[in-house]
Amino acid sequence: MTFNFSAGPAMLPPEVIEQIRADLPEWHWRGVGQGASVMELSHRGRAFEELIAEAEADLRALLAIPANYRVLFMQGGAWGQFAAVPLNLLREDEAAAYAVSGGWSESASKEAARFGRVEIVARGEAPGYTRIPPRSAWAVLPERLAYVALCSNETVHGNEIHDLLAFARDLPAPLVVDASSHFLSRPMPVAECGLIYAGAQKNVGPAGVTIVIVREDLIGRSRRVIPSVLDYAVMAKANSLFNTPPTFAIYVLALTLQWIKRQGGLATMETRAIERSEALYSAIDRSHLFRAPVVPAFRSRMNVVFETGDAALDAEFVRFAEARGLSGLKGHRSRGGLRASIYNAMPMAGVAALIEAIEAFQSKHG
């Protein structure tokens, strides 16, 4: 059996894959055949409108999203939101504060700077980003502040904010969170955030749909001209159906949300994430060949970054692991090394197989 450790697009639950395969020739919605695949049906049809409404309802239930927040299904991935957030929230006489803890928050801050004034109020130590600057170490926030932005799990560098409330409390402006790579792996304090966004291709489905959870008072805030497909007001008014949405991606997202519910919800997802990550980090920490550079308190449960310290040896391990049916372990091109992404769909058996590979490779190299 092959285990896919890719950072995204990432593996989906086998039960979801089986349902997709069954539905491909003809989609059956609530037991009624639709005469075509979901990819061929209109997003204006009753079946798809009911599907997207059900997906929103399931997402609201899983995350306990308050009634004064809108859920939007958009396109463009997290990169699209790097622009959409300042376009929708940042006024001309205000600043946006960014905490940079890795490559994605760095990219978000640079994109936002194209649309307004950005101040970096915290920065981890590049290039490794092995720890996240605590709130107590942040610079003084600007007086006229539109929002504060951070990335709660850095996919490339493998660090994660485990206590988001510690960053959300007592802020003078709404907190904006890029939660892409650990979205739905644990509960989140939605009510303490102004806006949360996440690409689906880690824990929730295939690439193509981006989930945006935004407090209603922030919609239409900037008063500037915004491209319609990035305008939260336009998308909210149209219930995410302003233009043709990524229908297949939303269909898979809906199936995945149902799967998470059947597993026991986000409490179960978090318990499994802790079990998987602790087992893998323990194996790496026991090793005399591999090391996990991120400080333990900030280690991601989703993206385990590790390395030997020798690029050639890292590449050899990737080949060694692939021969054992373990794919996607090459580190991000900007960082190198190794990375095992162990999202919701990864079974404990996959982690056990990776641990066996680490131990076997270490024995091979003495």
Image: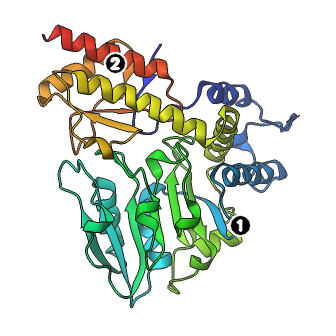
Which residue was labeled with disc 2? Answer: 355
Up-down relation of residue 252 to residue 280 (above or below): below
Of the 4 image quadrants, the one containing the C terminus is top left
Q: Give the left or right position of residue 91, taking residue 56 as reference.
A: left
Q: Residue at x 46, y 54 (%)?
A: 179
* Nearest the eye: 189 or 351: 189
Query: SS for tag 1?
Result: loop
* Nearest the eye: 86 or 350: 350
* Nearest the eye: 14 or 268: 268
Residue 292: mark: none
Residue 25: x, y in percent? 73, 29
Q: Residue furthest right?
A: 32
- Confirm whether residue 84 shows in the render: no
> How is the structure coloured here?
rainbow
Q: Residue at x 64, y 47 (%)?
A: 250
Residue 8: x, y in percent? 43, 39
> Where on the picture, by quarter, is residue 338?
top left
> Where on the picture, by quarter, is residue 278?
top left
Residue 176: x, y in percent? 46, 67
Amino acid under disc 2:
Ile
Residue 46: x, y in percent? 84, 52
Q: Residue at x 46, y 51 (%)?
A: 180
* Nearest the eye: 35 or 88: 88
Q: Residue at x 58, y 67 (%)?
A: 214
- Confirm whether residue 97 shows in the render: yes
N-terminal of the pair, mark 2 or mark 1, is: 1
Amino acid under disc 1:
Ala
Query: Neighbour class for label 2 at 10 Å: few (<14), some, many (≥20)?
Result: some
Up-down relation of residue 322 to residue 95 (above or below): above
Which residue was labeled with disc 1? Answer: 67
Cα distance in 3D space between marks 2 and 1: 44 Å
Query: Neighbour class for label 1 at 10 Å: few (<14), some, many (≥20)?
Result: few
